[in-house]
Image (cartoon, grey):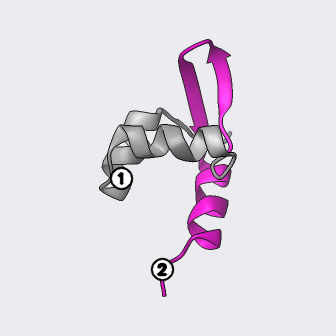
Amino acid sequence: MNKLFTPKQIANKLGVSEFTIWRYIKAGKLKAIKLTKRNFRIEQKDLNQFLKKHKTK
């Protein structure tokens, strides 16, 4: 089973603000599963894909 994270957990992992993660989701840069109007989860595979695509040089 694929692990799920909240935007807050991802923000903490990446050392960015939760607002930044919300912007990535809204812009379509980070795929998220919408549970309710304000409740999202990010799958581990989608986080890995995002990190691979946006890896800093």
Three-letter amino acid code at the position of disc 2: Thr
Q: In which quarter of the image is residue 54?
A: bottom right
Q: List x then y, in percent, for residue 24.
A: 56, 47
- Does residue 27 sit above or below 36 in this rendering? below
Q: Residue at x 61, y 12 (%)?
A: 37
Three-letter amino acid code at the position of disc 1: Lys
Q: List x then y, in percent, for residue 47.
A: 58, 53
Q: Does the magenta stretch include residue 23?
A: no
Region rendered in magenta: 31-57
Q: Residue at x 52, y 42 (%)?
A: 23
Q: Residue at x 38, y 35 (%)?
A: 8
Q: In which quarter of the image is residue 39?
A: top right
Q: To which residue does mark 2 refer? A: 56
Q: Quadrant of residue 4?
A: top right
Q: To which residue does mark 1 refer? A: 13
Q: Residue 34 carries which label?
A: none
Q: List x then y, in percent, for residue 10.
A: 43, 45
Q: Does the magenta stretch include residue 56?
A: yes
Q: Element under label 2?
A: loop
The residue nearer to you, when weighing 20 against 10, is 20
- Does residue 52 sit above or below 7 in this rendering? below
Q: List x then y, in percent, for residue 9.
A: 38, 39
Q: Which image quarter is the N terminus in?
A: top right
Q: How far is disc 1 from disc 2 in space, using C-alphas?
A: 16 Å
The residue nearer to you, when weighing 22 against 5, is 22
Q: Which residue is drawn at 37% across and 57% down?
A: 14
Q: Is residue 32 left or right of residue 15?
A: right
Q: Which residue lies furthest to the bottom in this view?
A: 57
